[in-house]
Amino acid sequence: MALSAATLLVAGTGLAHSAEQAYECTFRQIPANGGWLAENVIFSYAPEKTSIVVYDGIIHEYVGHPIDAKISNDTANRLTMSWTVKASSASNQKTTMIYRLTMAKADMKAMLTAIPQGYEGTYTAQGTCKKIKS
């Protein structure tokens, strides 16, 4: 499910507060990812905080509102965050998906990864991010 940054911000998700910067990352979709990676991920980031607010189509479907992501790496070069979503497959198998997004700060290139707990496989997609609100 593709959600545009404008749609999410207009819908009042509260992603960006005055001291935070909002980003939209767009990821290339491939069939091998089975729909477990969103095409667009939006997050709000403030360097002085230890968590990030994140929202995408997967979160929208299974949670319905933005959630907190944990910052695992924040350097001058790179920002890495992770979050979990309890989900179910098309065959109604339930799992917790562990997501990780890494963004290179210099060129805004990003990698999105999803790992289903209790199942084999890792889903990955490459993309780019852009600032959408400061």
Image (cartoon, rainbow, N blue to C red):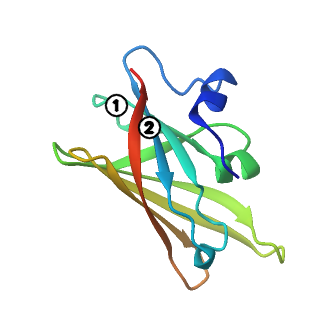
> At x 63% / y 75%, what residue is drawn?
31
Which quarter of the figure has residue 75? top left
Q: Which residue is mark 2?
A: 52
Q: What's the distance in space between the residues labelled 2 and 1, CA to CA?
A: 8 Å
Q: Which residue is mark 1?
A: 49
Few, some or many residues within 10 Å of mark 2 (<14, 14–19, 20+)? many
Do the numbered discs 2 and 1 sit on residues whose CB atoms are within 8 Å? yes
Q: Say which amino acid is labelled 2.
A: Ile
- In the image, 85: left or right of 24? right
Q: Position of residue 35 (x, y in %)?
A: 67, 67
Task: Report helix, strand or loop for mark 1.
Answer: loop
69 and 24: which one is in front? 24
Is 10 above or below relative to 96? above
Q: Where does residue 80 sit, x and y in percent of width and height? A: 33, 52
**The C terminus sits in image quarter:** top left
Q: Give the percent coordinates (x, y) of residue 57.
A: 66, 49
Amino acid under label 1?
Answer: Lys
Percent coordinates x, y for residue 109 in the rendering: 32, 53
The residue positioned 74% from the left and 41% from the top of the image is 64
**Mark 2 residue element:** strand
Q: Which mark is residue 96?
A: none
Which residue shows up at 68% across the image and 59% down it?
A: 86
Q: Quadrant of residue 36?
A: bottom right
Residue shown at 34%/28% (left/top)?
A: 46
Residue projecting furthest to the left = 76
